[in-house]
Amino acid sequence: MAIQWFPGHMTKARRQIEEKLKLIDVAIELLDARLPYSSRNPMIDDILGTKPRLVLLNKSDLADRAVTDEWLAYFARRELEALPVDSVTGHRVNDLLPACKRLLAERIERRASKGMLAGAIRALIVGIPNVGKSTLINKLAGRKVAATGDKPGVTKGQQWIKAMGGELELLDTPGVLWPKFEDQQVGMRLAITGAIKEEVIQVGDVGYTALHYLLDNYRDALRERYALDGLAEGSAKDDLKAADTADREVILSVMEEIGRKRGCVVSGGEIDYDKTALVILRDLRAGKLGRISLERP
Ligand code: G4P
């Protein structure tokens, strides 16, 4: 991750968001649809308080549809309005305004009963690095207004961006929050999606964990992508778990086969483990293995 989060940065990031909350009607919490739990800031409920909130499951184009539906049901049970979106193509981004209106229905009605115009809905996008905040802002603005890549604590002049025919106004600088680093599984899952860079966690370990998860949950996709004809039929386990020794041999032999097929071989004829891990991770991140979700509610 580009950002080094120290306690001072966290306090500052939180304070900046709390300042911005005073200016807005609704907070838009952006999560990664492939890992809505791990891409969530641990203090988000506390930070947003009673501010009306819309949860967006971004990158839904990369996530398993059935699992995304489970997450939508999960958020509905928790009485949080949630929407799956794809900020690159803009798929379902237009549903954002009606969703905000539903959240603010009471206020809008109250104003109407006093003969006042509804006015534009003012919103702030918040989320951890890499979740797609800038991409969404640019999509909503219809032009490049937000730079991709985050720097915490850098304040620049804030501007309102008009979107949805002027019915929505968005702060151009998103609220950047930190992930749950204290949980190792969270770090690993974020690394699998590329939200945490390989310099922080060994690429071989990330690739190994990803392969283990794919073998447990998306075996057919693996078989198809790498022509692993010898691989037994799929098994579906519930969640990403730490590698156990029983599966180790299978995982390593599949790694070996993929490495050979992709030409990731070093001079002695051994496979280049890190290179093979990168092949798998790049394919997974680019959606070449199909739609993959990394966690369920
Ligand atoms: P941020 O502001 O929250 O940090 O995220 P940003 O918009 O920079 O997006 C991070 C990466 O995620 C970008 O890829 C962006 O194109 C991609 N992305 C954002 N929304 C979506 C989405 O809905 N679907 C898909 N498939 N991708 C999305 P990138 O420019 O390639 O960056 P990187 O991969 O080199 O970090």
Image (cartoon, helix red, strand yellow):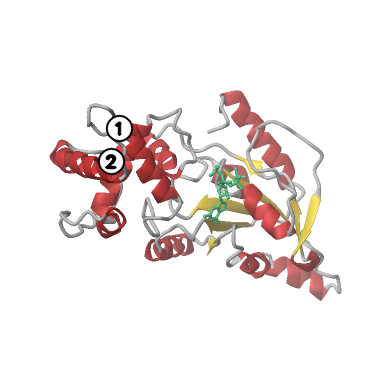
The answer to whether mark 2 is within 8 Å of ligand 1 is: no
Secondary structure under the numbered disc 1 in the rendered image: loop
Q: Where is residue 134 in the image (x, y as percent from the top left)?
A: 65, 48
| Mark 1 lies within 8 Å of ligand 1 (Cβ measured) | no
The residues bearing labels 2 and 1 have C-alpha atoms spaced at a distance of: 7 Å
Foreground residue, 6 or 94? 94
Residue 29 locus on image (x, y percent): 59, 52
Snapshot quadrant of residue 117: bottom right
Q: On screen, 108 above or below 180?
A: below
**Amino acid type indicated by mark 2:** Gly
| Residue ID for mark 2 | 259
Q: Write down the residue under mark 1.
A: 272
Q: In this view, does 228 lie to the left or right of 25?
A: left
- Residue 170 visible at all: yes
| Quadrant of the rendered image containing residue 281 | top left
* Total tally of numbered discs in the picture: 2
Residue 241, can we see it? Answer: no
- Sequence-wise, the earlier of marks 2 and 1 is 2
Q: Which one is in front, 146 or 102?
A: 146
In percent of the image, x 77 and y 66: which residue is there?
167
Give residue 82's position: percent from left, percent from top. Answer: 53, 62
Horizontal arrangement in the rendering, residue 64 relative to residue 58 (left or right) = left
Residue type beneath disc 1: Asp
Query: Can you name the residue that lies furthest to the front here?
Result: 267
Whether the residues at callouts 2 and 1 have beta carbons within 8 Å, the answer is yes
Residue positioned 40% across, 30% down in the render: 201
